Amino acid sequence: MQSNDEETAKPRTTEVKLSSWEEFEERVTALDPGNERRVWDEVWFRGQADARWALETTLERRSRGTQVSDYLRVIQRIKPSVETFTGLTFDMPPYQVIEQSCRQFDLFQGFMFESATYMAHLRHGGFPSPLLDWSHSPYVAAFFAFSKARDPSHEVAIYAYREHPGIAKFGGSDEPNIFSMGPYIRTHNRHFRQQSRYTFCAQFIDGHWYFAPHDSVFKITSRLEQDLLWKFTIPASERRKVLRHFDKFNMNEYTLFASEEGLLEMLAMREIDLRE
């Protein structure tokens, strides 16, 4: 039960409206914690081509209120097909362990990390995922935001997320919680090209874990020293300038994805988008 103060307090998302790419570069420098030895205290970034879009996972766009055990059973069933195509082998707990662990509050976090490699691989491949992908690089996040932006009258959004500046992170057993994965996991090589990090949000309800929207955590006002979020909006009309800038550093679809589709998108950007 929330107190009256918690109910009237503002959400912990800081929205910053910017007028140019240069303003973003200035702002993002100020977010750097300046402590490279504390891996848990990184700031992670995520770019979205339309600032009006919600901060949602690809699984949320396909299905709401998913039980964690149901999703894990699905990806367990498709694993032989993925392994046959890729030639790789992915570790996952058996069905009985999935069912048992998803009904126990204290075992959940460690148990989920057993499937981290496989879940991250599926996310990079486009399978609906409960993982929200971030990047350690604000520039990678900005590239994804601007490269997909098409309407110059709208704004792109670049989110910055800081999980917990302190030594420990706290969460209530009856509240949604954000869990993080990365940077060092064995998964798709795009993980390293894109400096990927991942979060998922889950809540323990009536003896079972469910995936939950990240926004449900950012609205909790009793945890003001963790799960901090900034939303920077920038006019999409800055797109061509920003992509030209990135291309000088050879940051494009090809270098971030290393695929034929990425090569063709890079060529289309150079020969069509940047020449208009």
Image (cartoon, helix red, strand yellow):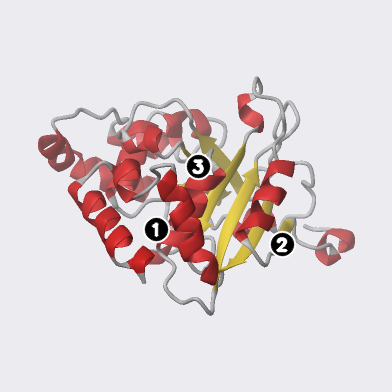
Looking at the rendered structure, the kind of residue marked 2 is: Val
Image side of residue 274 versus residue 36, left or right:
left
Looking at the rendered structure, the kind of residue marked 3 is: Ser
Residue sitting at x 48%, y 52%: 245
Counting residues from the N terminus, which is met first, the one under dot 3 or under dot 1? 1
Front one among 211 and 173: 211
**Quick one: label 3, few (<14), some, or many (20+) residues within 10 Å?**
many
Disc 3 vs disc 1: which is toward the camera? 3
Q: Judging from the image, what secondary structure is the residue with disc 1 in?
A: helix
Looking at the rendered structure, the kind of residue marked 1 is: Thr
Q: Judging from the image, what secondary structure is the residue with disc 2 in?
A: strand
Numbered mark located on residue 16 in the image:
2
Instruction: Report the residue marked by disc 3.
Output: 135
**Quick one: label 2, few (<14), some, or many (20+) residues within 10 Å?**
some
Label 2 vs label 1: CA separation? 25 Å
Q: Position of residue 53 (x, y in %)?
A: 52, 69
Image side of residue 200 versus residue 216, left or right:
left
Q: Position of residue 10 (x, y in %)?
A: 80, 63
Task: Determine which quarter of the picture holds residue 101.
Answer: top left
